[in-house]
Image (tube, rainbow, N blue to C red):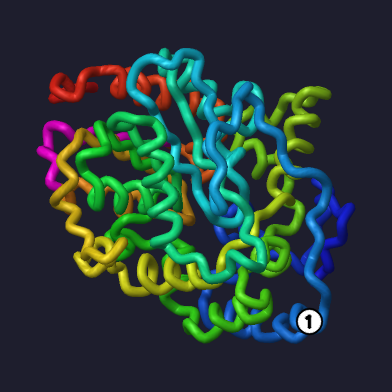
Amino acid sequence: MATMGSNRRFSIESKNPSFPSVAFLWPALAAEQAREFAAAIAKEFAKLAGGSEPQQPGVEPEWTTRNEVTLELESVRLRDFSTSPDGVATLVCAPFALHGATIADFAPRHSLVAALQGAGVQRILVTDWRSATATMRFLSIDNYLADLNVLVDQLGTKVDLVGLCQGGWLALVFAARFPAKVRKLVLAGAPIDIEAGDCALTRLARGTPTSLFREFVEVGEGRVLGQHSLEFWGPRAEEREAIHRVLQVPDHVASALLRQLEARFLDWYAWTVDLPGVYFLQVVEQVYKENRLATGRFVALGQCVDLTKVSCPIYLLAAHDDDLVAPGQVFATARLVGTASQDIQQAIAPCPHLALFMGRATLTQIWPRIARWLAQPATMVKGAA
């Protein structure tokens, strides 16, 4: 496996066979079968353990839309993209996984934040989760949930909470733990009931022994280092068509602007965040292996989470071609919560996972519909299209 240096960038033309052909996943998959993955990862542990801490390539991705940091905690920055201080706050709970929160504001015409703004949402904020330092290695799910609670309280009133991917299950837990603080809830590509659908990531989590995940944390001295993850699970430099499917741009267009967009995506993908080992192992074991959230056994801030306490209107969005989160894992939310069926909207986008948040077609066709749904009073959403 190649070592990622400080100036490393993926070449679009490269066909390095040491990387798997399955690209752009969280985490990207080294093998379709867990047994093959376990064998491959075991061979690499010695290399990681003997090397120095990997360096980040390039520079941290920039935010596309103008914003300001209005609150900064150990684990997260609250970024405010609002064009007006009035109205209900829409808080986007970004994923805390391999990549940074700029997934919600990737590039012009590929920004979820801009899509919501363009459809009339004026008060938008995003959780910008901070890469874990060595002193943060013991942070748990409870720490992140508590800090999310601080952010919501900072906004002063009930919020509309938009959970993306890994930020989705955290948003649902928050809504169940603090139901009086959430007016509406959007879950996009969020793994809620792992048993309700099958996908590559689910098979990997089920089939890989917990001991291997723990060893991965030990190699990072209590953290899961993002660059280690990228070396294990990151893609070979995939052909342009794969990037185009994520960004939903035409394959046949050959222009300087498109090449810049491809390069921007590769730079974004190469930049990673580090995760606290405690948090990472809790997610693996409790969310994926034991499916505690869907089975009523998930404990958050000292209380067992009861999803039936979530009664606010909900919008569920899934990707049809998703190897990370099967659509059934998202849509199962409808039968787990206390929200009336007529107050639950569902949509499935014809795209892969990342295109839910970065794809031009998804952002221009589906997210404006969600924005209009958010704009309706909570008492008038029944039967909304």
Front position in the image: 264 or 174: 174
Compared to 380, does 55 lie above or below? below
Residue 238 seen in this snapshot: yes
Count of labels shown?
1
User: Disc 1 designates what residue?
Assistant: 47
Residue drawn 27% across and 62% down? 293
Q: Position of residue 97 (x, y in %)?
A: 55, 56
**Category of crowding for the residue at label 1, using alpha-carbon neighbours closer than 10 angstroms: few (below 14), some (14–19), many (at least 20):** few
Residue drawn 69% across and 58% down? 235
Compared to 35, does 180 lie above or below? above
Where the C terminus falls, by quadrant?
top left
The quarter holding residue 68 reads top right
Front position in the image: 299 or 40: 299
Where the N terminus falls, by quadrant?
bottom right
Helix or strand or loop: what does disc 1 sit on? Answer: helix
In this rendering, would 96 be left or right of 159?
right
Residue drawn 37% across and 55% down? 191
Residue 332 seen in this snapshot: no
Front position in the image: 127 or 338: 127
Residue 339: within the magenta? Answer: yes
Q: Which residues are magenta?
A: 338-349
Q: Position of residue 39 (x, y in %)?
A: 62, 85
What residue type is disc 1 on? Lys
In this rendering, would 290 be left or right of 322?
left
Residue 218: within the magenta? Answer: no
